[in-house]
Structures are given as structure tokens and as C-alpha cells.
Image (cartoon, helix red, strand yellow):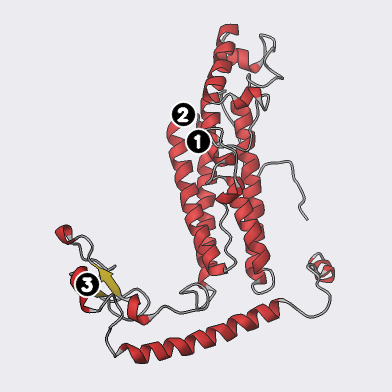
Amino acid sequence: MFYHVKDLQFNARVSRPDPRFANLLLEQFGGENGELAAAMQYFTQAYGAKMPHPDKYDMLMDIAVEEFSHLEIVGATIQMLLKGVNGELKNAADESEIMQVMDGAEARENIIHQALTANPHFVTLSSGGPRLTNSQGIPWCASYIHSNGDLTVDLRSNLASESRAKLVYEHLMKFTDDPYVKETLSFLMTREVAHYKMFEAALETIQPNFPPGVLQADPRFTRQYFNMSPQASVRGPWNKGEMPDLGKDWDYVQDPIAYVQATEGLTVLDDAKEAELEEVAELDAKMSEIKSQEVIAAEPKGTAQWSTYQDSKQLNK
């Protein structure tokens, strides 16, 4: 149950109309890295987490709702940036705010022209308000959402989503000199960083969380780094020394062609891997049992009930 408070989480303000930047800001309203996409991603991910990870369900729903509040901030900012373009103010008197800022009827017509040039949908389809499109007028699409059902995968997707959104806000700030708008964008950008750290902390509480899913990686193919750029080879922690968190060294394949030929297409490998294969098989069985019990525990017998209202009463005391 959502309860809408009409005061914004952050007091969005603009100092003057700017329809061109309003159009750019649509990227964070209806774009693939925008606030609606984030809200719907975390909202849908939360369902699968409700029973096995009720604490993560709470976190995902909290952040999803906050993202909806950010969508409201972005929409409000777009609307304010379009003052003088929407139907209410197009024929406003000379003493209106837009006329004071833009100095006369000619300037008013110019700002309307700017809005039409930037995105004709503003006037032709929405009468001067934000629509669920990106800055090119492409409609918002559910394919922007990544919800895979494995919470460790979903949380890693969220880390990437927050990273991309942070960069979009950072780039947007380059295209406005309005100090109020920059202040709003800085707030929104910073909350992306905060959410990133929340998801990172949540991921660490799920152990083991690598590799995703149930089945372990085949040890015969896990450690090889194939040198596919022999003319400009570079060594680093991604192909030299110990693999991160796995306690085993990288196997650097200097000549991939010769290696593949010698191993008959990676089918004839060191017999020493047999013991590791047995360990992996045992771990696969163990992880399968753990995941199975997790699913069974998440689906209690009898009547299914999403909410326990008695618990809610206790929380409200």
C-alpha cells in the first residue's frame, strides 16, 4: 500500500524556463537508465525475494518507492522548465512569470519554438508536460528491466543500473547552468551512489553469492586467460597471479591456437583436474539441496497469504 505525500523528497526548483534541457531531462523520466526503469526493476525483483529473503524484499521495496519519488522530482522539474509552453500559460498576460523572464511576446514565441524543435511531443501530444519517453521521443519499454529471479544476479544488475544512472545525471549537469536544477540533479545523482552501496552491502549478506545460481564452474575451464592480442599483450591482476577470492592462480595461455590444437579443442586436459571435478559435483549437490530447501521454505503449506496484518499492528504500536 502506497501513501502519497505531495511534498517532494527534495525541493525541486528552477530559475527560468529551459525547454531544451527539459527535453534532455526526459532521459531520466522515460529513458532506459531513468527513474521509472529503476523503480520498476526493483519493484519486480522484490516479489521473488519476499519469502526466501524478507529483509531484501523490504530493502528493494523501499528503494523502489524512493525511485518513484525521484521520478516525481524529475517530472516536476521538467514541468517547471516548460513554463510558458504548456496550455495554461501560452496566452498569459504580460505580467506572467514567463513574460517577465523572457521579455515580451516575441521571446515567448521563441521559447515555444525551442520546445517544438527539441521534442514536438511536448506540445502536440502532452500539451506541455513530461511523457514516458526518452529525449528522442522513444517510448519507455519494459525491456529496460532486468529481473532474473536469482537475487545475487539481480543485485549485481542493480549495481550496474545505479552506476549508469549516476553517469547520466553527471552528464546532464554539463548542459544546464541553472543553479537550482544543478542542485536537484546533484541530489538525484548522489542517491544513486547511496543505493549502489545499499545493494553492495545486501549482496555481501548472501553467502555464497558466486557463481550465480546452483551449478559451480567447471574447474577445467575457469582459470585460463587466452592471450587474444599477441601484438600488444598486457599482464595484470585479471590474468596474472591469484584469481580474486578463489585462491587459485590464473593459467595464462600465451598461444591460444597452439593450446587449443594440443588439447584437441579443450577436450584433453590435465588429469589433476579429476579431483577438482569430484569436488564440484559434491558442491553442486549441496547447493541444489540448499536452494531446494530455500524454495520449499518460501512456499508454506496451506492458504497463501502475502501480508500478516497482525505483524503490521505490532509495528504501529
Report the residue at 21% width, 74% height from top. Answer: 261
Q: Which residue is mark 2?
A: 177
Circle 1 Cα neighbour tier, 10 Å, few/some/many (<14 / 14–19 / ≥20): many
Residue at 64% over, 54% down? 64
Residue sitting nearer the eye, 260 or 165: 260
State which mark lies toward you, 1 or 3.
3
Whether 20 is drawn above or below 58: the answer is: above
Q: Nearer the viewer, residue 125 or 151?
A: 125
Can you say which quadrant of the picture contains the C terminus?
Answer: bottom right
Residues packed near mark 3 inside 10 Å, few (<14), some (14 to 19) or many (20 plus): some
Secondary element type, mark 2: loop
User: At x 75% / y 46%, what residue is drawn?
Assistant: 4
Judged left or right of residue 73, residue 212 is: left
Secondary structure state at the residue bearing disc 3: strand
Q: Which residue is mark 3?
A: 253
User: Which of the two labelled residues, at mark 3 and mark 2, occupies the earlier sequence position?
Assistant: 2
- Can you tell which mark lies on residue 205? none
**Residue 134 on image: x %, y %:** 55, 37
Circle 1 is placed at which residue position?
A: 182
Circles 2 and 1: CB distance less than 8 Å? yes
Which amino acid, mark 1? Answer: Lys
The alpha-carbon separation of the residues under discs 1 and 3 comes to 49 Å
In the rendered image of this protein, does residue 252 appear above or below residue 75?
Answer: below
Quarter the N terminus occupies? bottom right
Of the residues under marks 2 and 1, which one precedes in the sequence? 2
Label 2: few (<14), some (14–19) or many (≥20) C-alpha neighbours in 10 Å: few
Q: Position of residue 289 (x, y in %)?
A: 59, 86
- Where does the image place residue 200, in percent across and percent down from the top left? 50, 64
Give the amino acid type for the residue marked by disc 3 in the picture: Val
Relative image position of residue 154 (x, y in whole percent): 55, 63
Residue lying at 52% horizontally and 40% vertically, measured from the top left: 185
Instruction: Tell me the SS state at disc 1.
Output: helix
